[in-house]
Amino acid sequence: MSKIFQRRALLLAAIVPALMVAGCAANTQAMKGAASPTEMESPGADTSPEDSASPGDTAGGGQAETAVQGFFDALKSGDVDQVTDTFADDAVVLLAGQPTAEGSEAIKSLFEKQLQGGNGMKQATHTIDETRTAGADDAIVRATSKQGNDNMRELFVLTREGEEWKISQFMNNKG
């Protein structure tokens, strides 16, 4: 197991449980129309401007968010190569109801199946709910999507490769 993969696994083990617990309550409210993600705050949360990520965020949160938006745009375009290019070479994808895809070829094959026939991705809507940096080279992005009649919860782990952010792990499930 490579050091990079070990680092990502530890990062996931440390952060995912907290994000999922916090995100489940927020996603349920947002999907019911109770509040938009930008309006929701956790009790006692510090919402100072430097804590939130924006597209111009030099700490990497905004750049990671832009990479996830690129993934969503690629899905809508139906371009499998463009979708695959948003992932790191050793990425892992866990789509609800599908076998785990590890590495570029497996991810490409998975999305070829997902995108054939148009399966409603062109009309899907995607919302980035939260972005958190984890050091200079890692970030977590939590999002929700509406795909046909399905509300999906999505979690992305991204890593910086040179100047570019790539998705290293992606998983989703129905909300």
Image: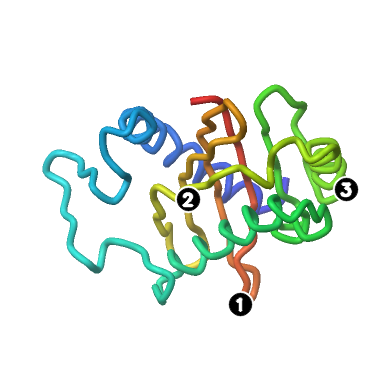
Residue bearing the label numbered 1: 163
Residue bearing the label numbered 2: 141
Q: Amino acid at mark 1?
A: Glu
Q: Is residue 144 left or right of residue 80?
A: left
The furthest residue to the front: 123
Q: Identify the residue shown where x is 49% and y is 61%.
A: 65
> Disc 3 vs disc 1: Cβ atoms closer than 8 Å?
no
Q: Is residue 97 above or below residue 91?
A: above
Q: How is the image coloured?
A: rainbow
Residue 89 percent location from the top left of the image: 77, 56
Which one is in front in this view, the residue at disc 2 or the one at disc 1? 2
C-alpha span from label 3 to label 2: 24 Å
| 3 or 2: tag closer to the N-terminus | 3
**In front: 166, or 148?**
148
Structural crowding at the residue carrying mark 1, measured as other residues with C-alpha within 10 Å and reported as few (<14), some (14–19) or many (≥20): few
| Callout 2: SS | strand
Q: Is residue 157 above or below residue 85?
A: above
Q: Is residue 61 above or below residue 112?
A: below
C-alpha span from label 2 to label 1: 18 Å
| 3 or 1: tag closer to the N-terminus | 3
Q: Amino acid at mark 3?
A: Glu
| Quarter of the figure with residue 81 | bottom right
Residue 72 percent location from the top left of the image: 62, 53
Q: Is residue 40 above or below residue 67?
A: above
Q: Is residue 48 left or right of residue 76?
A: left
Residue 126 percent location from the top left of the image: 52, 47
Q: Amino acid at mark 2?
A: Val
Q: Identify the residue shown where x is 69% and y is 51%.
A: 76
Structural crowding at the residue carrying mark 3, measured as other residues with C-alpha within 10 Å and reported as few (<14), some (14–19) or many (≥20): few
**In front: 82, or 5?**
82
| 2 or 1: tag closer to the N-terminus | 2
Residue bearing the label numbered 3: 105
